[in-house]
Image (cartoon, helix red, strand yellow):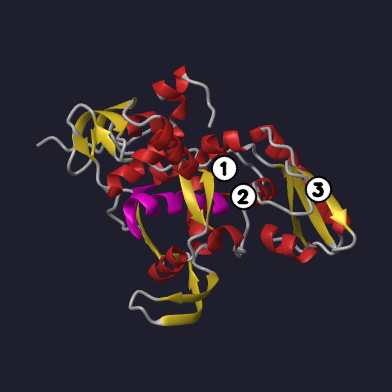
Amino acid sequence: MQKKKIIYFRTMKEIQRFGMIINQIINKNNILTDSKLPDSAVLTQKLVNVLYSNYETQGAEFTIHLKDLCKQLDISNQTRNHTRIKDSLRILKQPIELRNFNDKKGRKLKWYLGSFLDKAKLFEDSMDYVTIRLDEDLIEGMKQHQQYTKIDIETSNKFKTKYGITIWEMYLRYKNAKREEAPEDLTYQMFSLDELNGKFGTQYKYKSDIIKCINRGLQEIETITGIKIAVKWQENFNKFGFFWKREKETQKFMTDELAFIKYIRTQYFNEFLLEIENYRTKKYTGKIALKCTEEGYLIDMLGNVKFGKAEAKQLWNYLFTHQNQIMALKQKRFDF
């Protein structure tokens, strides 16, 4: 009997061709965005985002091949990187604090100490498939703190320094915050030396030392994203101030998924949006052509099928991350 061969997905296009839609843009709970990881190594921060993406699509427990995990992290599939992933998983077993939420049984928790990762298992006969389970109480707490930062995993994976990725996620967290004392098109966020040491996992005693790391991160952000962030020590507050330009409202739907969905529902209902080849779920298989109805539902124009909440969530994310392929948006001006 011929031995069955396992076929792996090697590229994002190949994954999408087979209908496995992966959330490239995650709604990262601000509990995680604001948390201080025991080790702020850049791979550990990237791994948090990738595991969170898998959680959004598969639930608290999922199994993934180390080769595919390397692909999602945009690193080479080599033994040394498998070791680095395992080292980062060990770090994610260390504690994160949560306060004031109800556990799954509805009991009020005043304080909770748990890890992002509950367990990770790699069996001798598993052919490098690792089973990962996230802490369900932590997940439950995050669900009840409904404040998120949208993280583009593809962009985050480009960072090579912990300073760049840390400041980048800080920028995404506060990028359109309105400050009464600031001009309309500008905003800022301030951090003390101790707070930045906590975020970077460093122990600098003097601001003249940590500013070198900050500038290195800011240069990396500009190189990767084109976003310019300025930093200046604020003597009156004894903190570093990070300053940048706020997005114009007309650009918001291009970078904010909820604004994008609202825009499509109000401006492009009953219009063909995008075709997906070989879309596959438990209920649907084959080519689909997406349209948003006047009531705001996503439907398949070919099969006249209205998608349920779970499928619609994934499809809206797919449309958002592939908006440059939507025919209606190509033909009309981006304007509210």
Query: Real-space Cα distance between discs 3 and 2?
Result: 16 Å
- The residue to which callout 2 is attached is 169
Residue at image location 54% in from the left, 63% down from the top: 31
- Tag 1 and tag 2, C-beta contact below 8 Å: yes
Q: Nearer the viewer, mark 1 or mark 3?
A: 3
**Residue 312 belongs to the span the image colors magenta:** no
Query: Real-space Cα distance between discs 1 and 3?
Result: 21 Å
- The residue to which callout 3 is attached is 231
- Image-quadrant location for residue 272: top left
Range of residues picked out in magenta: 44-65
Three-letter residue code for mark 3: Val
Residue at image location 31% in from the left, 43% down from the top: 312
Please give the label number shown on residue 264.
none
Of callouts 1 and 2, the N-terminal one = 1
Q: Nearer the viewer, mark 1 or mark 2?
A: 2
Q: Is residue 289 left or right of residue 273?
A: left
Of callouts 1 and 3, the N-terminal one = 1
- The residue to which callout 1 is attached is 156
Q: Secondary structure at mark 2?
A: helix
Q: Residues within 10 Å of mark 3 (few under 14, many from 20)?
A: some
State the residue lying farthest toward the left.
1
